[in-house]
Image (cartoon, grey):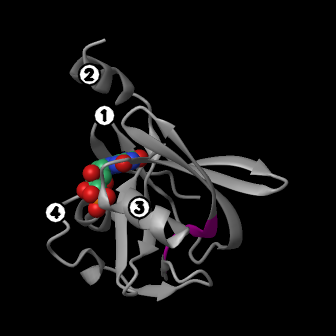
Amino acid sequence: MEPQYLRTVLAQWATGVVVVTTHAEDGGRHGMTASSFTSVALDPPLVSVCVASGGATCRLIRASGVFAVNVLGRDHEEIGRRFSGPARSDRFALGDWGTATTGAAVLSDAVAWVDCVVAACYPAGDHTIVLGLVQDAATPRPTAPLIYHDRTYHEGITR
Ligand SMILES: Cc1cc2nc3c(=O)[nH]c(=O)nc-3n(C[C@H](O)[C@H](O)[C@H](O)COP(=O)(O)O)c2cc1C
């Protein structure tokens, strides 16, 4: 299967958009935009995200053993772009960020967030499936979610 072709086919799958955050050994924050977030189980409460194994986010989640998942709202497109762009700039310069129990950053006006400790990491090709045991969760702002489809951001339907 030609990767570029497969990417085009899979781009037809609409998803929500999250920012996965974690922290470095020196306490610095790190985060990246992701669409691979999934609810896995309720008992025990487990969620997953697939992260590129060679990336900074994967390395830092493995080292810290914690991460948070922030569900972006309809007006968070710029945050989605910033957290998928070059990490040289301060990705956290956009948005109002607080700190959850694990030390991972949470967005004060996220549609929802979950704060996790790493339960397991499974290698999956060039990515790693990170399974998180949920420690805390919140729904700070009941608004429509940001949607990603066909490589384009869309506003979700307002409740
Ligand atoms: C909408 C969207 C969804 C993305 N989903 C993922 C994902 O699920 N996993 C992943 O590893 N990268 C994903 N990316 C790409 C990362 O956000 C991007 O490569 C980022 O720069 C990685 O940051 P890092 O190198 O600091 O880990 C996505 C990008 C966009 C725009």
Mark 4: secondary structure: loop
Distance of mark 2 from mark 1, alpha carbons?
Answer: 16 Å
Binning the other alpha carbons within 10 Å of mark 3 as few (below 14), some (14 to 19) or many (20 upward) gives many
Q: What's the magenta region?
A: 109-117
Distance of mark 2 from mark 4, alpha carbons?
Answer: 23 Å
Q: Nearer the viewer, residue 117 or 105?
A: 117
- The amino acid beneath tag 1 is Asp
Q: Residue furthest top?
A: 1
Which part of the image, by quadrant, shows the N terminus? top left
Q: Position of residue 89 (x, y in %)?
A: 15, 75
Mark 1: secondary structure: loop
- Residue position for label 4: 86
Predominant secondary structure in magenta?
Answer: strand
Binning the other alpha carbons within 10 Å of mark 1 as few (below 14), some (14 to 19) or many (20 upward) gives some
Q: Nearer the viewer, mark 2 or mark 1?
A: 2
Is the distance from the Cβ of mark 4 to the nearest ligand 1 atom less than 8 Å?
A: yes
Which part of the image, by quadrant, shows the C terminus? bottom right
Q: Nearer the viewer, residue 49 or 106?
A: 49
Mark 2: secondary structure: helix
Q: Is residue 143 above or below residue 33?
A: below
Q: Position of residue 16 (x, y in %)?
A: 47, 49
Whichever of labels 2 and 1 marks the residue nearer the N terminus, that label is: 2
Whichever of labels 4 and 3 marks the residue nearer the N terminus, that label is: 3
- Residue position for label 3: 74
- The amino acid beneath tag 4 is Pro
- Residue position for label 1: 150
Distance of mark 3 from mark 2, alpha carbons?
Answer: 30 Å
- Residue position for label 2: 3
- The amino acid beneath tag 3 is Arg
Task: Please say whether residue 113 is one of the residues in the magenta stretch.
Answer: yes
